[in-house]
């Protein structure tokens, strides 16, 4: 069976042609997990496949799911000891939609505890490792999902973002990661972190797979009042249209990045030019302010969302919170209650408005904005402890899209001098996932991401 | 970065911990004093932006007044057995809590 590195679209084709059965496909990935999981710590809990012949747009395709999505009957911990033994009595909307599409759950992936972090090192169940170099972090918080895709332990994975938690680990592990528009994919049944920010999304090895998964999980849900009634696009069809775009580049998103990252991103921009796209300089509010807005709003929402963990109805009591969660809860309590509400929370909400207006203005002039996804490539494990602000610094280029709610994607654009993947970010206008997927697809067809994804899993051929 | 430096005292930290119902050790207190202050110093940069008369954003996609349709059945409601299944302190299908009165 020649399965290694096949995309979900290709696997669906092979299943249709009966090159192998669903059961064989599930067993193939299960075996890879058994072989490699101790190396990467990507999965925390494995599910068992039961029946065969799943119907639907993802019929028979195995998938990994971040451990903050409730899965009925399958342990869901958000990588925290508070939820160490929690068996959800219900499915998240994304879980329901993946199941209905015929996708088959392989297991639940490791993450920063409560999704608080950008390296997967705050997990109470040990860090995940980057398959490109196991001394390095996979990024986070969806680090387990990113590692699973990078080493091809799963063909598709579900991650979630509050700010950067899909794009940043996708960049560091060299895979495709899409953060949809806020409200495009329902949050019902996702362990809540920052409720005005949280976005579930796909992590895949091709842009088309990301579009395929998005078509399955996107759409209004009456159980999430913040999910959008805007109709879901035909992303796979739209992404293949030949389009010439105006691509915005902002100096503010090209500053303070490593030379290696800059070089690869500049080369990617040259490729876009060669393809006939127009590059246009635009001016954006510095992302350093998005960090502040994000820090205030997210901590405030964390302090409220994590108040529910009382150890009475489910889970362990509050003595089981790790340091990062405690730090965030207390800062949230501070900004909301200390008589500093206007100076911090309200100010952050106002600056959030400025950032939204700024993006809306620029999207009148350009179709997309391109930048690096991260200022540097994957750091060594342990680095994060040196900075209490680690996540925010690593996610600086992701936070504008997060606080404004616009969609953005990471695609690989080459390797740095240490042979680590570099990520390119494409940001788009509200609910315009089709356009960023279209440009990602064009880049993929032109470059095959410089074989980054292929080189990633070819290290783990057996 | 702001030139003023925020100071948080031990009693500030203890007060925040109490508000959030968190137990913290002495070692954590001194760590949080400096870490929280450092974060607060950073976010002071928002003052550099003029927000006079700017409306606040609490929802980014402009949704308003979302209601459950009349007559819609909540088909995701849990049974009482399901609802208490994960509780360590339950009795006769109820959550057991400490006496409040």
Image (tube, helix red, strand yellow):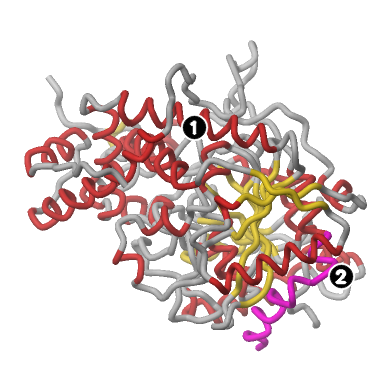
Measuring from the top left, give residue A92's x and y in whole percent: 57, 42
Q: Is residue A223 above or below residue A449?
A: above
| Mark positioned earlier in the residue sequence (1 or 2) | 2
Q: Are marks 1 and 2 in contact (CB under 8 Å)?
A: no
Disc 2 packing (10 Å; few <14; some 14–19; many ≥20): some
Which is more toward the observer, A297 or A358?
A358
Cα separation between marks 1 and 2: 47 Å
Percent position (x, y) of residue B16? Answer: 17, 37
Image coordinates for residue B78, horizontal then vertical, percent: 50, 32
Mark 1 sits on what residue?
Answer: A352
Look at the picture and state if A421 lies above or below B47: below
Q: Nearer the viewer, residue B98 or A130?
A: A130
Residue A431 position (above or below residue A109): above
The magenta stretch spans residue A106: no
What is the tally of numbered marks visible in this picture? 2
Give the chain of mark 2.
Answer: A
Indicate which label's residue lies in the foreground, 1 or 2: 1
Question: Residue at the spot x=37%, y=59% of the render?
Answer: A390
Task: Residue under label 2, please give it.
Answer: A14
Which residue is painted at 83% across and 74% down in the image? A20
Any part of residue A251 in sight: yes
Q: Is residue B23 above or below residue B100?
A: below
**What is the chain identity of the residue bearing mark 1?**
A
Residues in magenta, as a range: A442-462
Report the quarter where the C terminus of chain A lies: bottom right
């Amino acid at each position: 069976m020649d399965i290694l590195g096949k995309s979900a679209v290709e696997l669906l084709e092979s299943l249709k042609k009966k090159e192998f059965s669903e059961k064989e496909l599930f067993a193939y990935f299960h075996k890879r997990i058994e072989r490699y999981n101790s190396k990467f710590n990507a999965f925390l809990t494995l599910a068992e496949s039961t029946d065969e012949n799943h119907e639907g747009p993802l019929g028979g395709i195995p998938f990994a799911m971040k451990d903050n999505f409730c899965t009925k009957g399958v342990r869901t911990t958000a990588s925290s000891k508070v939820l160490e033994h929690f068996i959800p009595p219900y499915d998240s909307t994304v879980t329901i939609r993946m199941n209905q599409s015929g996708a088959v759950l392989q297991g639940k992936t490791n993450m920063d505890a409560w999704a608080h972090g950008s390296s997967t090192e705050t997990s109470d169940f040990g860090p995940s490792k980057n398959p490109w170099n196991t001394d390095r972090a996979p990024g986070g918080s969806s680090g387990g999902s990113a590692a699973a895709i990078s080493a091809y332990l799963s063909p598709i994975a579900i991650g979630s973002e509050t700010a950067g938690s899909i794009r940043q680990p996708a960049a560091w592990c060299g895979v495709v990661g899409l953060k949809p528009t806020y409200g495009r994919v329902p949050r019902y049944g996702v362990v809540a972190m920052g409720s005005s920010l949280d976005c579930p999304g796909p992590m895949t090895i091709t842009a088309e797979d990301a579009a395929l998964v998005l078509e399955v999980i996107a759409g209004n849900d009456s159980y999430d009042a913040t999910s959008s009634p805007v109709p879901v696009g035909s992303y796979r069809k739209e992404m293949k249209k030949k389009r010439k775009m105006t691509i915005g580049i902002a100096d503010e998103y090209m500053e303070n990045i490593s030379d290696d990252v800059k070089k690869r991103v500049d080369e990617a921009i040259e490729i876009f030019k060669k393809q006939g796209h127009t590059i246009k300089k635009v001016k954006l509010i510095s992302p350093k302010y998005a960090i502040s807005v994000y820090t205030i709003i997210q901590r405030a929402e964390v302090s409220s969302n994590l108040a529910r963990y009382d150890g009475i109805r489910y889970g362990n009591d509050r003595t089981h919170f790790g340091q990062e969660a405690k730090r965030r809860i207390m800062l949230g309590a501070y900004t909301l209650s200390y008589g500093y509400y206007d100076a911090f929370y309200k100010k952050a909400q106002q600056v959030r408005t400025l950032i939204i207006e700024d993006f809306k203005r620029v999207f009148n002039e350009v179709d997309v904005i391109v930048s690096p996804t991260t200022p540097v490539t994957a750091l060594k494990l342990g680095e994060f402890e040196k900075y209490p602000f680690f996540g925010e610094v690593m996610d600086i280029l992701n936070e504008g899209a997060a606080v404004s709610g616009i969609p953005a994607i990471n695609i690989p654009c080459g390797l740095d001098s240490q042979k680590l993947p570099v990520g390119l970010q494409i940001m788009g206008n509200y609910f315009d996932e089709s356009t960023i997927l279209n440009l990602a697809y064009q880049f993929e067809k032109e470059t095959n991401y410089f074989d980054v994804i292929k080189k990633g899993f070819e290290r783990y051929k057996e | 970065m702001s030139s003023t430096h925020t100071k948080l005292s031990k009693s500030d930290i203890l007060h925040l911990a109490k508000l959030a119902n968190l137990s913290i050790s002495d070692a954590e207190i001194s760590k949080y004093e400096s870490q929280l202050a450092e974060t607060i110093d950073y976010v002071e940069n928002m003052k550099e932006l003029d927000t006079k008369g700017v409306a606040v954003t609490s929802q980014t996609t402009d949704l308003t007044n979302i209601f459950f349709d009349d007559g819609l059945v909540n088909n995701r409601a849990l049974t009482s057995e399901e609802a208490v299944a994960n509780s360590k302190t339950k009795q006769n299908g109820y959550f057991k809590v400490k006496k409040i009165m």
